[in-house]
Every structure is written in structure tokens, then in C-alpha cells.
Image: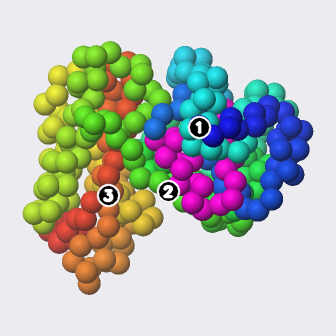
């Protein structure tokens, strides 16, 4: 067992703890309720820097009215124990007043990537994410910051504004960690009843079916349909969307449900033209669905054909 990380709350405590660290720093940002996916971020952070700083903060600016801000699990004592198993150095767990000493009036808009899919369903979400991530990067000044691939669009948004604003940090994505039943680990999974957990497995099955279809070289529309059919057939699952994006720039290539009308034909054609010589392109399939009262997301990389109706 490693020693518990140093817990800080105020900006002054954080600055003092950071000043005592010699060498490079990696940052892992979380909203707490830590699971094995978060701990994997910390483990990989140790491979990239001398010290690891973890933030634990349920950020109010990324929740819209009526979302689960008040209900979101807050388990700081258990989180500190969990971090002791992977050796984080410093934890910053600010109050709202510590994170936002004055009400925030600045808005960071990462452009088109922030306004499709999750950005269309939750219009204020990514602006809140961008704001809190920028604040943490400015306060902690890490050499590298790690974010989970489960929130693939969030990762794309962060990479976009970090690049566009010339923030001097390397953004490192970390692969999804799944439970033995295939369900992607998420703090919101604890909202699920036993029966709902059974239904939630349909998301990873849908991804498996889509990847199997893609391996046959079928058009992108068929890859999308393979996933959609699994979700539609599962009792207790209310799909929001299935989408396929260019994994390089998050251009939306195909979508169903709420994503059906979000495809920009001009951008889609440009993506496929870039990959025409290879015959296939690196893409990502993304799903969102409500299981009971809980909204879940999942995704995976996939190689898709650039022929057929894809163009």
C-alpha cells in the first residue's frame, strides 16, 4: 500500500503542494466516485511523469438544470483510499468557491466538435468541461494530462481547444476499461438496478456487432445499422443515437436517432477523400442510450470501408 496522497482543498494548499514536487507532473481530472478506469489513468500517468496530481471535483458548469449534479456520487474518503493503491502524489478536491472564486462569465467554445452528438443533447456541457479543464491546466501546469477514451467526444473537445489555444500540455487518451460483462466502467453505473445492468450490456454487444460488420467491408450505413439493431432489440434500452466519426478529427460520417440529421455531407466527403488511397479509414463508433433513468455512453475504434454509400 502506498501512502495516501496529500489532500488539498484551497488554491493556496494546492500551490504549496505543487511547489514541493521536483520533476515532471501528470494530471488526471476526475469527478470522484473512482473506479478501476480512473485508477488505470493514474497508473499510466506514473509512466509518463515523475508525479501525479488528481483532481476530484463535481464541476457544476458542465451540468444543465435537471441533470444529476446533486445526485452525482461524492465519495472522497473512499476515493483517497483507492488512490493509495496506485500512488497519486497530490489530490486537489476544491469546493465550488475554491474552483470558482468569482462566478465564471467566460465561455470556451471548441467549435463544431462540441456541438454534435453529446453537444447537441447537452448544449452547455462541453463549454463547462472546457472551462474547468483550462482552469486546472493553468493552476497545475502539468507536462501531460490523461483522459479516458470512454468520453471520446470530450477527449476530442479537449484536444481541440488545447491545440487552438496553444496550451503547453500533452493530452494523452487512455483506453476504456470494461467490467467482465463488457460494460464500460462509469461512475454512473451504480445508478443501475440489477435488471438494468443486464440491459446495459447491449451497448457493448452493439459495438461488437458493428465491428464485425465493418470487418466484412460493408458500407458505413450497414455498420451503423448493425449496432442500432442490437439496441432496438433490447428491452429496457432507449437509444439516443448511434454515430460513426472520423477518428482523426471527429467528423460525423453517419448517424441514427438524434444524430441522423447532424451529418455535414461536405465534411464527410472530405474525410473519405483523405482516406481514399488506403481503401479504409480509422473511425470510431459511438453510442448513447438511456437504461432506466441512467444515460450511458460507449464507443470503440473501428476500421471502415471508404467505398459504397460512404461517399
Which label is found at residue 173? 2
Residue of label 1: 1
Location of residue 188 (image quadrant) = top left
In percent of width and height, residue 5 lies at: 70, 38
Q: Within 10 angstroms of label 2, few (less than 14), some, or many (20 or more) residues?
A: some
Disc 1 vs disc 3: which is toward the camera?
Answer: 1
Q: Which one is earlier in the sequence, the residue at label 1 or at label 3?
A: 1
What separation in Å lies between label 1 and label 3 (alpha carbons)? 35 Å
Which label is found at residue 155? none
Instruction: Return the residue nearer the eye: 154 or 28.
Output: 28
Residue 97, above or below 45: above
Q: Which one is earlier in the sequence, the residue at label 2 or at label 1?
A: 1
The span picked out in magenta is: 37-59
Magenta stretch encompasses residue 49: yes
Give the SS element for disc 3. Answer: strand
Left or right? Give the position of 72 relative to 60.
Answer: left
Instruction: Return the residue nearer the eye: 247 or 264.
Output: 247
Disc 2 vs disc 3: which is toward the camera?
Answer: 2
Left or right? Give the position of 32 relative to 219.
Answer: right
Disc 2 vs disc 1: which is toward the camera?
Answer: 1
For the point 75% across and 27% down, the residue is: 96
Give the SS element for disc 2. Answer: strand
Give the SS element for disc 1. Answer: loop
For the point 36% across and 19% down, the residue is: 192
Residue of label 3: 301
Amino acid at each position: 500500500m502506498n501512502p495516501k496522497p496529500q489532500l488539498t482543498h484551497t488554491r493556496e494548499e494546492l500551490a504549496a503542494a505543487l511547489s514541493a514536487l521536483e520533476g515532471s507532473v501528470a494530471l488526471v481530472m476526475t469527478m470522484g466516485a473512482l473506479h478501476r478506469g480512473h485508477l488505470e489513468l493514474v497508473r499510466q500517468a506514473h509512466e509518463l511523469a515523475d508525479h501525479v496530481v488528481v483532481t476530484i471535483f463535481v464541476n457544476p458548469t458542465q451540468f444543465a438544470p435537471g441533470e444529476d449534479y446533486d445526485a452525482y456520487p461524492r465519495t472522497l474518503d473512499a476515493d483517497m483510499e483507492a488512490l493509495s493503491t496506485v500512488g497519486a502524489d497530490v489530490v486537489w478536491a476544491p469546493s465550488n468557491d475554491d474552483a470558482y472564486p468569482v462566478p465564471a462569465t467566460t465561455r470556451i467554445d471548441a467549435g463544431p466538435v462540441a456541438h454534435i452528438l453529446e453537444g447537441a443533447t447537452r448544449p452547455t456541457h462541453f463549454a463547462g468541461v472546457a472551462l474547468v479543464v483550462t482552469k486546472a491546466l493553468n493552476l497545475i501546469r502539468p507536462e501531460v494530462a490523461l483522459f479516458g477514451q470512454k468520453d471520446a467526444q470530450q477527449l476530442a473537445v479537449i484536444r481541440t481547444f488545447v491545440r487552438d489555444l496553444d496550451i503547453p500540455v500533452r493530452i494523452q487518451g487512455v483506453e476504456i476499461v470494461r467490467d467482465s460483462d463488457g460494460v464500460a466502467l462509469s461512475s454512473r453505473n451504480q445508478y443501475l438496478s440489477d435488471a438494468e445492468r443486464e440491459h446495459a450490456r447491449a451497448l457493448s454487444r452493439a459495438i461488437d456487432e458493428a465491428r464485425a460488420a465493418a470487418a466484412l467491408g460493408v458500407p458505413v450505413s450497414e455498420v451503423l445499422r448493425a449496432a442500432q439493431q442490437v439496441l432496438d432489440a433490447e428491452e429496457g434500452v432507449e437509444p439516443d443515437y448511434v454515430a460513426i466519426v472520423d477518428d482523426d478529427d471527429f467528423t460525423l460520417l453517419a448517424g441514427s436517432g438524434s444524430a441522423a440529421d447532424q451529418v455535414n455531407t461536405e465534411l464527410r466527403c472530405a474525410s473519405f477523400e483523405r482516406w481514399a488511397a488506403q481503401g479504409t479509414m480509422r473511425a470510431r463508433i459511438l453510442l448513447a442510450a438511456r437504461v432506466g433513468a441512467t444515460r450511458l455512453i460507449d464507443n470503440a475504434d473501428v476500421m471502415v470501408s471508404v467505398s459504397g454509400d460512404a461517399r
